Image (cartoon, grey):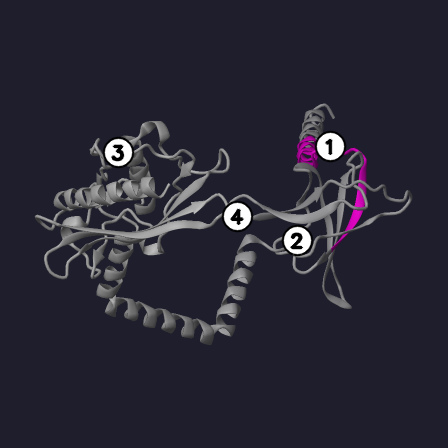
Amino acid sequence: METRAPFVMIGAFVLAAIAAVFGFVYWLHNTGGIGPRTSYHIQFEGSVPGLLVGAAVLFNGIRVGEVTELSLVPDQPRRVDATIAVASPTPVRADTKVGLEFQGLTGVPVVALEGGQQFSASGTVPTLIAEAGAGQSMTQAARDALRRVDTVLAENAEPLKTTIANLQIFSDGLARNTSKLDGIISGLERMTAGGSSTSKVTYDLRAARTFSDASRKALKSGLVVPEPTAVAMLETQRFLFSPANDVPAFANAMWADSIPKLLQAKLLESFENYDIAHAPLRSVDEGQADYQLLIDIRRFQITTDADPVADIGLSVRILDKNGKIVASRLFQETQTLDKLEPAAAVIAFNDAFARIAKGIIAWTVDVL
């Protein structure tokens, strides 16, 4: 008896140690020890690839239990029923969201529970309904997406083919008309005075400065010179030609302002040089004027039919405060250019405008 006693004690110790190890592993596996558990039924509509009995159950990312049972429903082939056992303190509600998550590189599935506000009725085992497509893995989702894309392409193969053919026709048309498109773009750049890397050169018009003292009479006050009217072609800072033509020497030349504004400013300056004390105003904003000097621009261009000349033509009318025309006259002047270049053109325009400005001032003084 004394010889057998140590072997019995050793065997009992080994069994106790094995039981302790199994208990410890069971406690670790369930992350809650052997405490109280609550079972819940889950319904999955569709497949649950890779889900096994013993798979972990997570609530808001924390492990709270495991899957204890999986079964099929004979009369509903698409449905899978599962039973989970989770720690009793876990706040599972009737509206808790249920899904599957695939963890790790191998994509091991676990049951994921999330949130919920409603309280379940006591005394019953609530049934949780998994979200539609909860068992769908990333691979399956990608496969389904590609299948849908393939279906869309198959259904619209003919319209896509037609669209690609039309794009090819459009591309061929652009290739055939490249030179025309370049011409259109160049024309737009010239029209907008842009698109050139060369800086623009601005030229100003000179007002009439010298007047004969012997024939000078004082201007009658109360005269206004509004901005001249003109056709749209003259609302520009570019040098204009008749017949219309693009002269390379004038590609980067432009007036200091649009032609109507420039003529108004220089005519007012000419009146001031004649009689600064009674010079006319620019507008009638400050009160009703006694007279208005209305100007319509007929021509302000370089005529190139023969020798190039600067050609200015202005139609001038004087209106009283009642809008009645007191007098009207057409003023025209030309001046030959020494060379067909911007500097020579500006000199010619200055000479022609000086004669017109002096004629308008003298005529206005006589009329008023």
Q: Position of residue 226 (x, y in %)?
A: 40, 42
Q: Secondary structure at mark 4?
A: loop
Identity of the amino acid at label 2? Ala
Q: Is residue 236 visible?
A: yes
Frontmost of labels 1 and 2 is 2
Name the quadrant containing residue 7. top right
**Magenta extent:** 18-43
Gap in Å between the C-alphas at discs 2 and 4? Answer: 18 Å
Quadrant of the image for the N terminus?
top right
| Residue receiving disc 3 | 216
| Residue receiving disc 2 | 134
| Residue receiving disc 1 | 33
Q: Residue furthest left?
A: 338
Gap in Å between the C-alphas at discs 3 and 2? Answer: 101 Å
Q: Secondary structure at mark 3?
A: loop
Identity of the amino acid at label 1? Gly
Asked if marks 3 and 2 touch (Cβ < 8 Å), the reply is: no
Gap in Å between the C-alphas at discs 1 and 2? Answer: 29 Å
Asked if marks 4 and 1 touch (Cβ < 8 Å), the reply is: no
Name the quadrant containing residue 119. top right
Q: Is residue 251 left or right of residue 170?
A: left
Gap in Å between the C-alphas at discs 4 and 3? Answer: 106 Å
- Closer to us: 171 or 123: 171
| Residue receiving disc 4 | 106
Q: Is residue 200 visible?
A: no
Asked if marks 2 and 4 touch (Cβ < 8 Å), the reply is: no
- Is the residue marked by circle 3 packed among few (<14), some (14-19), or many (20+) residues within 10 Å? few
